[in-house]
Amino acid sequence: MSNISSHAIISPDAVLGNNVTVGPFSIIEGGVSIADNCEIHSNVLIHKNTILAKGVKIYHSAVLGNQPQDLKFSGEETSLSIGTNTTIREFATISRGTAARKATVIGNNCFIMAYVHIPHDSVIGNNVILSNTVNMGGHVVIDDWAILGGMVGVHQFVHIGLHSFIAFSSRVTQDVPPYILAGGEPVGYKGLNLVGLKRRGFSDEQIKNIKNAYSLIYGNVYNTSDAIKAVKDTVPLTEEVKNIITFIEQSERGIIRK
């Protein structure tokens, strides 16, 4: 049974599932789809073409699916989708896509804290944590299990790798490879995200191979392309090592340095 406040404004063209809660003074436009067991707190604004999967929680005064902050946007039909059991806290703003990618996508089990801004055409993986006041440019890709500390700024088109951790107040202008800890000014490689890797069940052998790969990549002997060749030649090509190689070889902005 749903619990819809009499003070909420919900378009007759919106689709709400079972056991949905909508708080007072929230506005849900037409073309919105909200699945079962979602919680929409007070003063939330959900624009058209926004899709919420099951169990999403949206807290006070968040704005979802708003028009992209992109001068090239000309009113094309685009969308925002948010995955199962993701939580979005107070005053977060998340824009829908533009013609470039057609959609902004957020995965499952993410935790988006207060005042975070996720702009147009961004792709956020599963189990990602964006701490308070993380802000980013458009077209950012953040892979599964990444964590960004408070007040981190991310340049447009940056790619942040899986299981990485970016320290408080970092300014990220280049790609952040997987499994690492990044921080400092300018932001750089600070070692492996050992705490995160161990919490998620990575074995000592997996961690050793990741460490050996990054010892070559961030050592003082090789440039990046030669380091990748050395990794291929000397480090067991486990799934984790292959992820590192693929990430760096496909990087368009270049990776952060030490």
Image: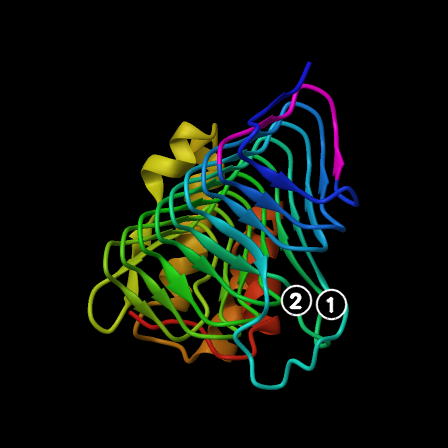
Residue 233 visible from this viewpoint:
no
Work out whether mark 1 precedes mark 2 in sequence or the reverse, and give the earlier one.
2
Q: Which residue reaches farthest left?
A: 185
Q: Which residues are magenta?
A: 15-24
Residue toward you, 90 or 158: 90
Q: Residue 10: which disc?
A: none
Viewer-nearest residue: 241 or 257: 257
Q: Main secondary structure of the magenta part?
A: loop
Q: Is residue 23 above or below residue 252?
A: above
Disc 2 on helix, strand or loop? loop
Task: Please report contact status of discs 1 and 2: CB closer than 8 Å, yes or no.
Answer: yes
| Along the line of sight, the residue nearer the viewer: 42 or 54 | 42
Name the quadrant of the N terminus.
Answer: top right
Quadrant the C terminus occupies: bottom left
CA–CA distance in space, label 1 to label 2: 5 Å
Left/right placement of residue 226 relative to residue 10 reads left
Q: Amino acid at mark 2?
A: Gly
- Please give the residue where the numbered disc 1 appears in the rendered image: 102
For the question of whether residue 183 can be seen, the reply is yes
Name which quarter of the figure residue 12 lies in.
top right
Residue type beneath disc 1:
Lys
In the image, is residue 187 above or below residue 222? Answer: above
Task: Please give the residue where the numbered disc 2 appears in the rendered image.
Answer: 97
Which element is circle 1 on?
loop
